[in-house]
Image (cartoon, rainbow, N blue to C red):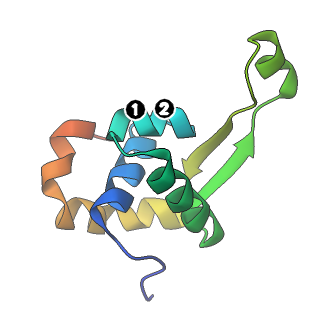
Amino acid sequence: MGRLFSLTYPTAAVLLAIRSGHRYGFDIMDATGLPDGTVYPILRRLERRGVLSGDWEDETDARSEQRPQRRYYELTSVGHESMAEVEARFPILLPIFGKETA
């Protein structure tokens, strides 16, 4: 199977952050140190390509905490298959994000 996305350092960091349990935009930004102008386009691109799936949280949860709804992301089976390449190409990121927790 051909590559579905360009595997850059920021993309690898986002994928590793999601795999390690950071699942919504601000949380991923905090974990990676990447700005929103980098993280959100990566999330949209990976979701369009089937590497991630995203679902909005229940509106009542957000309202009860008086904040906007969060979109939670998780790796799809394609995303999990891509992790071997992420680990091989960016081993320097592995100690930062550790192994899979989900």
- Dividing the picture into quarters, in which one does residue 63 lie? top right
Q: Is residue 61 above or below residue 30?
A: above
Q: Residue at x 34, y 57 (%)?
A: 10
Q: Is residue 97 above or below residue 66?
A: below
Q: Is residue 97 above or below residue 87?
A: above
Instruction: Tell me where residue 70 appears, x and y as whole percent.
Output: 69, 34
Circle 1: residue type: Asp
Q: Which residue is mark 1?
A: 30
Instruction: Tell me where residue 31 appears, x and y as whole percent.
Output: 36, 34
Q: Nearer the viewer, residue 102 or 92?
A: 92
Instruction: Tell me where residue 69 appears, x and y as whole percent.
Output: 75, 31
Q: Classify mark 2: helix, strand or loop.
A: helix
Seen as rendered, the residue at the extreme bottom is: 2
Residue 80 seen: yes
Q: Residue at x 28, y 69 (%)?
A: 85
Q: Residue at x 75, y 28 (%)?
A: 68
Instruction: Tell me where residue 66 appears, x and y as whole percent.
Output: 77, 13
Crowding at mark 1 (Cα within 10 Å: few <14, some 14-19, many 20+): few
- Dividing the picture into quarters, in which one does residue 32 lie? top left
Seen as rendered, the residue at the extreme right is: 60
| Count of numbered badges drawn on the protein | 2
Q: Nearer the viewer, residue 13 or 37?
A: 37
Q: CA distance from mark 1 to mark 2?
A: 5 Å
- Dividing the picture into quarters, in which one does residue 86 lie? bottom left
Q: Which residue is mark 2?
A: 27
Do the residues bearing badges 1 and 2 touch, measured as CB atoms within 8 Å? yes
Q: Is 41 left, or right, of 1 in this rendering?
A: right
Tell me the quadrant of the picture where the N terminus can be found: bottom left
